[in-house]
Image (cartoon, grey):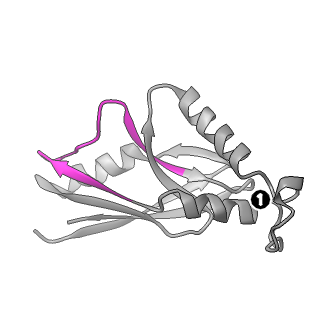
């Protein structure tokens, strides 16, 4: 099998989870590969990739709220130790979140389909407050 690769661009509108499952499913379907491994890699240092439940939107809201409490903005008194502040109060906290969450995922392909579970979806997790254009590389081998 020859490896296949594409880049997916996601326009974000601020913090939160942006589902990209359909784009990944489409890429695998078009590749006509029965068995393989899809690797996703986000080309940025202030967002992450996650596999998470896609049935109840409360899950995405709760995850966003949890990480906002875990790593608040740099202007929060609890974050007074931060020195990197040049790009605003959301920047260094976004880097911290991206350091503890995955920036790449590997998903088996079986029978020409992603081997995701029933309620699993693939998400870009945006950590910055302003809109961004994010790029995810999809590599199927």
The part of the image, by quadrant, that contains residue 54 is top left
Residue 140 picture location, percent across and down: 24, 63
Q: Which residue is mark 1?
A: 90
Locate the C terminus and report the quarter of the image it occupies: bottom left
Secondary structure predominantly adopted by residues drawn in magenta: strand
Q: Nearer the viewer, residue 32 or 40?
A: 40
Locate the N terminus and report the quarter of the image it occupies: bottom left
Q: Nearer the viewer, residue 10 or 86?
A: 86
In the picture, measured across the screen, residue 6 lies left or right of residue 9, that is left
Residues packed near mark 1 inside 10 Å, few (<14), some (14 to 19) or many (20 plus)? many
Residue 73 picture location, percent across and down: 80, 55
Residue 97 picture location, percent across and down: 62, 57
Rendered residue at 83%/67% (across/down): 81
Q: Nearer the viewer, residue 65 or 136?
A: 65
In the picture, measured across the screen, residue 120 lies left or right of residue 30, that is right
Q: Is residue 111 shown in magenta?
A: yes
How many numbered dots are placed on residues in this image?
A: 1
In the picture, measured across the screen, residue 16 lies left or right of residue 25, that is right
Q: Is residue 75 above or below residue 20?
A: below
Residue bounds of the magenta highlight? 105-124
Residue 86 picture location, percent across and down: 83, 74
Q: Is residue 121 shown in magenta?
A: yes
The part of the image, by quadrant, that contains residue 69 is top right
| Residue 76 shows in the view | no
Rendered residue at 56%/36% (across/down): 60
Q: Nearer the viewer, residue 83 or 107?
A: 83
Q: Is residue 76 above or below residue 91?
A: above
Secondary structure of the residue carrying tag 1 is loop
């Amino acid at each position: 099998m020859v490896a296949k690769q594409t880049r997916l661009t996601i326009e974000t509108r601020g913090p939160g989870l942006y589902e990209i499952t359909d784009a990944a499913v489409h890429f695998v379907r078009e590749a006509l590969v029965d068995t393989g491994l899809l690797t996703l890699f986000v080309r940025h240092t202030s967002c992450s990739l996650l596999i998470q439940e896609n049935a109840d939107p409360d899950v995405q809201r709760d995850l966003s709220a949890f990480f906002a409490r875990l790593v608040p903005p740099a202007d929060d008194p609890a974050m007074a130790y931060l020195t990197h502040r040049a790009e605003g109060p959301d920047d260094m906290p976004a880097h911290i979140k991206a350091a503890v969450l995955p920036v790449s995922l590997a998903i088996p392909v079986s029978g020409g389909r992603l081997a995701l579970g029933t309620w699993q979806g693939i998400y870009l997790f945006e950590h910055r407050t302003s809109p961004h254009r994010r790029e995810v590389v999809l590599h199927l081998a």
